[in-house]
Amino acid sequence: ATDMGSDLQQVLITEEQIGQRLDEMAAQIDADYEDRDPLLVGVLKGAVYVMADLSRRLHMSAPMDWMAVSSYGSGTKSSGVVRILKDLDTDVTDRHILIVEDVIDSGLTLSWLVGNLSSRGAASVEIATLLRKPDAAKVEVDVKYVGFDIPTEFVVGYGLDYAERYRNLPFIGTLRPEVYGG
Ligand code: PRP
Ligand code: MN
Ligand code: MG
């Protein structure tokens, strides 16, 4: 396999910057959930790295569960209709859910997920995301913990993929246009 470093255009957020921000987010989550036990819900697959690194910074023992969702039908997400590919193993009735995400783009995935989990009788549903693209929002989503607001630009790494690749870059970056065949 070739070195993916040669596919990179620019590093937007370094591994160190991500770590420092996750420290701050974890401290805030520890404080906010002092008197409640959260259930961490990661959204596969992008959230894997944020979940691993954020949860290890918490001082409480927080159980975690996973969902895999997909926008319904073709590649576009504009419908906002989401299909569950893998559901939670956990009954979330009366649980305090903290959804863990890598990025909020249009907001359609999270908007749907919050509604879905609330309708199952969760006691509370909050969101922690490493990245948010405010200019790309199609629906307003109330996000409690945001790592970084970034421009509407295609980024990869730290869980974010291009055609399932580059998730394992340890930082957030952009790819050279040639990589997309441009
Ligand atoms: C990406 C990302 C978020 C979602 C954000 O997931 O990880 O889950 O899209 O987009 P939205 O705000 O416009 O709904 P994707 O569907 O690419 O799946 P993946 O996590 O497996 O890459
Ligand atoms: Mn995702
Ligand atoms: Mg993806």
Image (cartoon, helix red, strand yellow):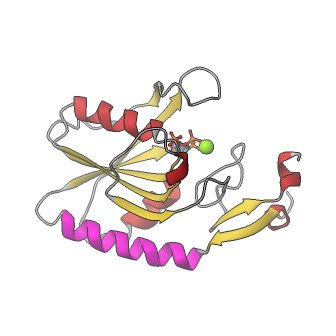
| Residue 67 visible (yes or no) | no
Looking at the rendered image, the quarter that the N terminus falls into is bottom right
Q: Quadrant of ligand 1?
A: top right
Residue 21 picture location, percent across and down = 44, 74
In the displayed image of the protein, which residue is found farthest to the left?
A: 35
Seen from the viewer's position, the closer of residues 13 and 34 is 13
Does 18 sit above or below residue 84?
below
Q: Total of numbered circles in the picture?
A: 0
Q: Quadrant of residue 173?
A: bottom right
Seen from the viewer's position, the closer of residues 130 and 159 is 130
Seen from the viewer's position, the closer of residues 12 and 32 is 12
Residue in the picture at 55% in, 79% down: 16
User: Does the stretch in magenta take in 133?
Assistant: no
Is 135 displayed left or right of 111 in the figure? Answer: right
Residue 119 picture location, percent across and down = 23, 29
Q: Which residues are magenta?
A: 15-32
| Residue 152 visible (yes or no) | yes
Does 162 sit above or below residue 173?
above
Residue in the picture at 41% in, 41% down: 110
Residue in the picture at 79% in, 65% down: 9
Residue 140 picture location, percent across and down = 39, 43
Residue in the picture at 66% in, 50% down: 161
